Image (cartoon, helix red, strand yellow):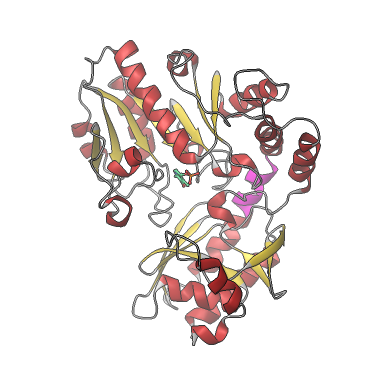
Amino acid sequence: MIEDMLRTPAAVQDSERHTAHNYHPLPVVITSAEGAWVTDVDGNRYLDCLAGYSALNFGHRHPTLVAAAHAQLDKLTLTSRAFIHDQFADFCRELAALCGKDLVLPMNTGAEAVETGIKVARKWGYQVKGVPAGQANIVVAEGNFHGRTTTIVSFSTDADARADFGPYTPGFRVVPYGDLAALGEAVDEHTVGVLLEPIQGEQGVVVPPEGYLPGVRRLCTERDVLFIADEIQSGLGRTGSTFACEQEGVVPDMYLLGKALGGGIVPVSAVAADADVLGVLKPGQHGSTFGGNPLACAVATEVVRLLATGEFQRRSAALGERLHAGLRGLIGKGLVAVRGRGLWAGLDIDPALMSGREACERLMARGVLAKDTHGSTIRLAPPLVITEEEIDHAVAQLAAVLAG
Ligand SMILES: *Cc1c(COP(=O)(O)O)cnc(C)c1O
């Protein structure tokens, strides 16, 4: 049945012929996009309710961001950090201000921001906290997703992500997400950081119990441990505020940012922290050839300016209410549970009805693109430029899919 729905079988097969099979994409071949909509090679249009896992928070080809990229392409694209370029200072200053932190360290991908956070926390532990050489540990949560490097998968609890990639990097302790007592027991005098997603995106948009994040903050302060918030997917407007931590009144010691920071145009990630933390790095101790390049900075500075207006955070909060109200109306009509904040929702479909994958295939056939996380859970994360009518349209298509 799904095969009958395929509008582009030849182009789909072509995309797999010389490709490592590390993804299982929906069978749609996209050729152009604008705002919340994409168009496939046959001219069919789809409402994008994934938004590149939040890399497209401002929609496809936001005019301000595309203009910044075009202008920069005609001037200067890469210098390496061996030299200074004229886009660098503004980006770092404005992003630091958005984060309320002293310093910014730019990288490219989210995984690199996480790796940077780990390295900084360890160095801070040895040089500032006084942890004996080689003894530092970092506490992380079950169900985490922080990226795909060998060190990061070392503390993943997802068997697919981790199995057969060892030997694993030591120095991590895994505790149940949302369990403050377990965290308190895992932290000891050698703990340098607690690394958490304030909402676990890949796990199915799992929101921790109320009071958890403030509890983590208190614990980290009391025990002299860095609270490292991975806001790569939850940050930059997705949840209705600049950072998901904000909604619990929490300020971490380190923000890890990525995805939307590149405006859907270039990969840009960053670590933001105060000088007593990020200041531990000295020349030669960390770096990246492409990190903080002129094109990345030009685009990301405009991203920061879009966020500084507050417009996207307000849209996400207001439209998120509408999305969640619509989705809650489907509980008992094929949905078992709905979680999330702002324009971010994890939906558990009744497993007796269909898998998350099948739901996404059926949604695709109805012109809506979404992605399953695992089992019968799917995630909706539309661009923050989506309209009320488009949200209602997406919810209606989901209702039709669930109704069979
Ligand atoms: C996507 C993601 C990462 C990894 O980012 P990449 O750019 O794919 O390396 C890390 N943490 C979280 C929470 C993410 O969602």
* Residue 311 sits inside the magenta stretch: yes
Tell me what residue is drawn at x 40 percent, y 23 percent: 120
Q: Residue furthest front?
A: 18
Q: Main secondary structure of the magenta part?
A: helix
Tell me what residue is drawn at x 66 percent, y 46 percent: 265
* Front-most of residues 175 and 113: 113
Give, as a single range, the part of the protein colored magenta.
Answer: 310-318
Q: Is residue 314 above or below residue 97?
A: below
Q: Which picture quadrant has residue 337?
A: bottom left
Residue 63 can be seen, yes or no: yes
Quick check: 89 left or right of 278? right
Residue 359 placement (x, y as % from top left): 47, 75
Tell me what residue is drawn at x 53 percent, y 41 percent: 235
Residue 87 placement (x, y as % from top left): 71, 25
Q: Is residue 114 above or below residue 3?
A: above
* Front-most of residues 53 and 320: 53
Residue 229 placement (x, y as % from top left): 43, 35
* Residue 132 sits inside the magenta stretch: no
